[in-house]
Image (cartoon, rainbow, N blue to C red):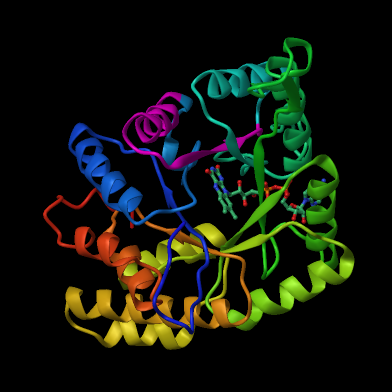
Amino acid sequence: MPTTSDPACGNIPFSFELYPPQSDAATSALHATILRLAAAGPDFISVTYGANGSSRRSSLDVLTHILRTTTVDPLAHLTCVGSSNAEASQLIREFLDAGVRSFLALRGDPPEGAREGEAFLGDLGSAAELVQLIHRVQAEREPYRESVIPGLPAARSITRERNKVRIAVAAFPNGHPRSRSTAQDIDTLLAKQAAGANLAITQLFFHADHYLSFIQRARAAGVEFPILPGIMPVTSPARLRRILELSGEELPSELAIALEVEPTKEGQREIGIRQATALARELIAGDAPGLHLYAFNQHETVLSVLDGCGLLTPTSSASAPSASAPPASDPA
Ligand code: FAD
């Protein structure tokens, strides 16, 4: 777990999100990025699934690479749109067999051209049902973890504990685009908790009070698990346009104008880092349980944000952002 010398930020966990690369060059760049991110000591590194046309194979390749080359826990995003129960169970088994023990259970978006209400969902209608299925498959596969207590007679030396997996779910501080009301977003989160989720990660947002008031409403309604704020440093006007299109978030006008009027790429990058760092510091001051950083397959920007929050140890900062690794491809 990272430590810090910055008393304003304390000692809170952080995590990163990556997406599967789409070419050989992007793959080797991503491997270099993973080493840099792992050196910072994240709680986990998550890998998207199905987004940008990625397949189960390409997600699994990144997850197993993290398992093989680092000590960081890889967290697999899984979506259930379009799968039968049997297909979804097989997918979960495949990830468990590869050594993955942490998941982000998602419903996923309708496929291109399909509309809400049409028959594209498959057997599982919501992320909550996928949470239940992950628990069920995992309990069938590996119900108990056994450990031997030295020095006790043989009959009493083996303890059996129920094996647990970490199952995160998505949360939407500004509401899911499909949601009918803010109350429905909280109800959905409660349903995910009842299904056995033990963590949530939010959609990106641009103002700390959006997250903090969402947390207040969620806690008042009985949501108990930690809800990690998702933070994305936005380093170009093109990226801002793309993520607003994908997330349905409202345009953050101040940031949009600052990025538009700044003529240099370096200047735009600095604006993105400054905005994300200020947001992260406000969230930490508001008692966020951690930070989840959308890394866009690059280490420099997110590590600069953590550095700005005082969340990198001297060793991890020293080995972090010198940009000798080639940047991975940028989808924006
Ligand atoms: P759910 O929670 O099941 O539903 C989403 C919302 O829809 C609910 O809040 C509710 O208001 C509404 N809703 C649900 N059921 C109904 C109903 N029956 N009638 C009316 N309204 C309903 N997508 C990918 O494809 N791959 C990824 O790797 C990926 N990673 C993500 C990571 C994070 C942190 C986040 C926040 C999103 C990610 N997404 C990803 C996007 C996600 O799949 C979409 O936002 C999807 O539309 C909703 O998924 P969910 O798990 O929140 O669904």
Spot occupied by residue 42 in the image (x, y as percentages of width and height): 43, 53
Quadrant of the frame with the C terminus: bottom left
Give me the residue at 40% from left, 70% from top.
311
Q: Is residue 209 above or below residue 331?
A: below
Q: Is residue 37 magenta?
A: no
Q: Is residue 310 above or below residue 123?
A: below
Q: Is residue 231 above or below residue 89?
A: below
Which range of residues does the magenta coloring cover? 57-81
Q: In the rendered view, does 171 fall on the left or right side of 292? A: right
Spot occupied by residue 84 in the image (x, y as percentages of width and height): 71, 20
Residue 150 or 300: which is nearer the viewer?
150
Q: In the rendered view, does 288 fall on the left or right side of 154? A: left
Give me the residue at 67% from left, 68% from top.
173
Residue 2 or 112: which is nearer the viewer?
2
Q: Is residue 42 above or below residue 104?
A: below
Spot occupied by residue 195 in the image (x, y as percentages of width and height): 82, 41
Q: Is residue 70 magenta?
A: yes
Give me the residue at 28% from left, 53% from top.
330
* Residue 182 seen in the current view: no
Q: Quadrant of residue 255?
A: bottom left
Spot occupied by residue 1 in the image (x, y as percentages of width and height): 47, 56
Label tally: 0
Q: In the rendered view, does 329 fall on the left or right side of 96? A: left
Q: In the rendered view, does 220 fall on the left or right side of 275? A: right
